[in-house]
Amino acid sequence: MITRGGVRPAPPVLLFGDMTDTQPGTLYIVATPIGNLEDITLRALRILKEADAIAAEDTRVTRKLLSRYDIHTPLIAYHQHSMAGRAEELLGMLTEGRNVALVSDAGTPGISDPGHELIAMCIMEGIRTESIPGPTAIITALVLSGLPTAHFAFDGFPPRKDSERHAFFASLKNEDRTICLYESPLRLVKTLHVMADELGDRPVAIVREATKMFEEVFRGRISEAIEHFTQKKPRGEIVIVIRGQSADEAEQSIQPEITLEDRLRRLMESGLSERDAVRRCTIEFKLPKRQVYAVALKLKGSTGPEA
């Protein structure tokens, strides 16, 4: 359009401002049932329905939940084998203004699953994150255990290698809080044996298949748990709850402070390889592996031909 003066009017400023100033979406951290599908919250159901996509640790597991409640939101697989590239993809969706619901196989995302990395990335990028609280296997097992709940610690899965597993439980020996752990049914009995070696025969609870049809809660001593699960092969999801060190046990276990160098020397003198001794001390002393390895090299040099 030309005006009488022959000058074309300037286009309105910010004509497309609303389209270019897209607000980022929200990452919803949605807790889902650990077994019984009725343990879903009304808010979680609404978010799962309204989200633009659901990032699921296992789409097959999540699809069962969505089918139960007639939810048809698109699913995107996000697990430990795909999380590097997929996290960037999800971050892109959020930046474009779409909302993503993050779910794990069961319980609260971000606890012993790949969800933590995506949550951390979103926080770093300034993307809104919102938690939709709900079931978690740790708290369920803790309250069922009958052990003290005022102070407790969660330590994920114990290491798989024998030497590291022994070091892991040795590092928990003086812990006076109730300890909660996850464990595979395939490794449960072996782990219980290591617990007995390193912690003594303490009270323990093994919560298996919580909220499901075949839920089992075993309460007793570690030795009794070994006997029980040796006779009855464990299956399903397992949480171990261990009573912390008592005041009497703490008094009995008081011993002179041992240095890292002394501990490394004793372990290697007992026949443990330098590599395994370093791994064990890394866990026991809660130090960087590089620092422990440097002490091991120094120790190795001092016991050489010139020593």
Image (spheres, rainbow, N blue to C red):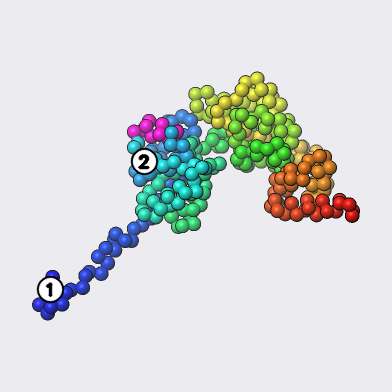
Q: Position of residue 300 (x, y in %)?
A: 82, 51
Q: SS at mark 1?
A: loop
Q: Which quarter of the figure has residue 277?
A: top right
The residue lying at 57 percent from left, 26 percent from top is 235
Neighbours of disc 2 within 10 Å: few (<14), some (14-19), many (20+): few
Residue ID at (31%, 61%): 20
Does residue 78 appear to the left or right of 188 in the view shown? Answer: left
* Residue situated in front as seen by the camera: 191 or 267: 267
> In the visual, does 223 lie left or right of 270?
left
Question: Please, what is the three-letter code of the amino acid marked with disc 1?
Answer: Ile
Q: Which residue is mark 2?
A: 74
Q: Residue furthest toward the left? A: 4
Q: Residue furthest bottom?
A: 5
- The residue lying at 36 percent from left, 57 percent from top is 23
| Range of magenta residues | 61-70
Q: Is residue 63 magenta?
A: yes
Residue under label 1: 2
Q: For the N terminus, give its image quadrant.
A: bottom left
Amino acid of disc 2: Pro
Question: Which of the 4 image quarters holds residue 172?
Answer: top right
Q: Mark 1, residues whose alpha carbon is within 10 Å: few (<14), some, or many (≥20)?
A: few
